[in-house]
Amino acid sequence: MIGAGPWAAGHPLPMSDWGVVTLSIRMERVAQLIKLEVSDILCNRLSDPRIGLVTVTDVEMTKDLRHAKIFFSVYGDKETQERTLEALDHATNFIRGELAPRIRLKFMPEIHFQFDPSVERADRIARLLDDLRSKEPNA
């Protein structure tokens, strides 16, 4: 078909960039799917008492889709965070086994968990701002 595809007139990307865009879209789609499925597995399939209130905040994939870094936040103190990370690391093979039938990929990515301090930092900033507002005299 003439005029179809990334080389068609008026297409915003040069032909050489088309593969890069497609790759990054695929990485993002796989990352979002892993985020959704791991969240479901942690809520409904994993019953480790060391895992507290965990939220999967982000997933980063390598370009070859062989490794996924899963960022999480957990409500609690530093000790709770460390226990949760230890429990998630211990459950990695179980989680990968649960992911395999849910995500159809040629290779199931190795998963690595990492604590995401951004939620904790945002909460601290919000509390500081609330303190400043409460100390301001009403105008």
Image (tube, helix red, strand yellow):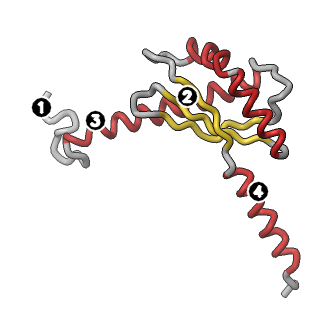
Label 3 close to label 1 by CB (< 8 Å): no
Q: Secondary structure at mark 2?
A: helix
Q: Position of residue 128 (x, y in %)?
A: 79, 68
- Percent x, y for residue 84? 77, 33
Callout 4 crowding tier (Cα within 10 Å): few <14, some 14–19, many ≥20:
few
Looking at the rendering, in which quadrant would you find the C terminus? bottom right
Residue type (three-letter) at the residue carrying disc 2: Leu
Label 1, secondary structure: give it: loop
Marks 2 and 4, Cα distance to the nearest angstrom?
27 Å
Tell me the kind of residue under disc 1.
Ile
State whether residue 2 is above or below residue 13: above
The alpha-carbon separation of the residues under discs 1 and 4 comes to 55 Å
Q: Which residue is mark 4?
A: 123
In the picture, measured across the screen, residue 90 lies left or right of residue 2, that is right
Q: Identify the secondary structure beneath mark 3.
A: helix
Q: Judge the density around disc 1: few (<14), some (14-19), many (≥20) Cα neighbours within 10 Å.
A: few
Q: Secondary structure at mark 4?
A: helix
Q: Amino acid at mark 3?
A: Gly
Closer mark to the observer between disc 2 and disc 4: 4
| Circles 2 and 3 in contact, beta carbons < 8 Å | no
Residue under label 1, please give it: 2
Reading the chain from its start, which is encountered first: label 1 or label 2? 1
Of the two numbered discs 4 and 3 on the same chain, state the one appearing first in sequence.
3
Question: Residue shown at 76%/20% (left/top)?
Answer: 46
Dots 4 and 3: beta carbons under 8 Å? no
Residue 89 quadrant: top right
Picture disc at residue 33: 2
Q: From the viewer's perspective, is the residue at label 1 or at label 4 nearer?
A: 4
Position of residue 18 in the picture relative to residue 26 (left or right):
left
Residue at label 3?
19
Q: How many circles with numbers are drawn on the protein?
A: 4
Real-space Cα separation, disc 2 to disc 3, in angstroms: 21 Å
